[in-house]
Amino acid sequence: MTKHRLELFSDGVFAIVMTILVLDLHVPEDPGLRGLIDIAPALLVHAATFAAVGVLWLTHHGALARVTEISSRALLFNLVALFWITLLPFAARNAAARPLEPLGASLMAACCGGFLLSALSMRLTARSTIDDNPRLASWRRRRLAIGFGMSAANLIGAVLAWISPWFGYGAALIMIGTTALLPSPPDVEKKVG
């Protein structure tokens, strides 16, 4: 399979997941401010989950940006990563219905951690122009350490969410913020002239 087909399939899954997220929003029974207050937890969970899916899509896109060769193992890890993405609407539905219960928060953190771990595994089993570039070796090591650290933090947050759901929400939100702020690799491969 070509990288282009992998990206198209993955982008389709991300688009469907983002669409499914909005289907869980319902018109409030009460009009006005009272209705808005009633659906506020669902709106907050929707916004956070939409941001998480968007950031994870950017992570996926970045992981494939300089890939030149896709292995069958990389395809398998990509499917596992997409599996975690498809569970996010279910996690969001649980979190919106019962925001102070552990299930939704735990699932959200577990999905983020599982996705990151699977996407890192996918990237490590694919061939990229970064892999053989000695000027990007330290950048690559730092990025892998950050990625595995965020995966571990989310998986730990998923477990700790059973003590307090705020651990799960916090782990997922920290992943969103950290990933959004990570710089792209330096452009040392540009050809002069």
Image: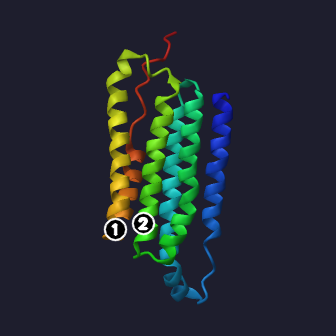
Per the image, label 1 sits on a secondary structure element best described as helix
Q: Position of residue 162 (x, y in %)?
A: 35, 69
Residue 97 can be seen, yes or no: yes
Q: Can I make out residue 170 in this image? A: no
Residue 135 percent across, percent down from the top left = 36, 18
**Residue sitting at 49 percent across and 49 percent down?**
55
- N-terminal of the pair, mark 1 or mark 2, is 2
Which residue is drawn at the image coordinates 55% and 70% (left, top)?
93
Residue placed furthest toward the top = 193
- Kind of element beneath mark 2: helix
How is the rendered protein coloured?
rainbow
Q: Are marks 1 and 2 in contact (CB under 8 Å)?
A: yes
Give the residue at mark 2: 105
The residue tagged 1 is 166
153 versus 89 height, above or below = above
Residue 182 quadrant: top left
- Comparing 53 with 1, the one in front is 1
Name the kind of residue labelled 1 in the image: Trp
Residue 77 vs 21, above or below: the answer is: above
x and y percentages locating residue 148 in the rendered image: 36, 41
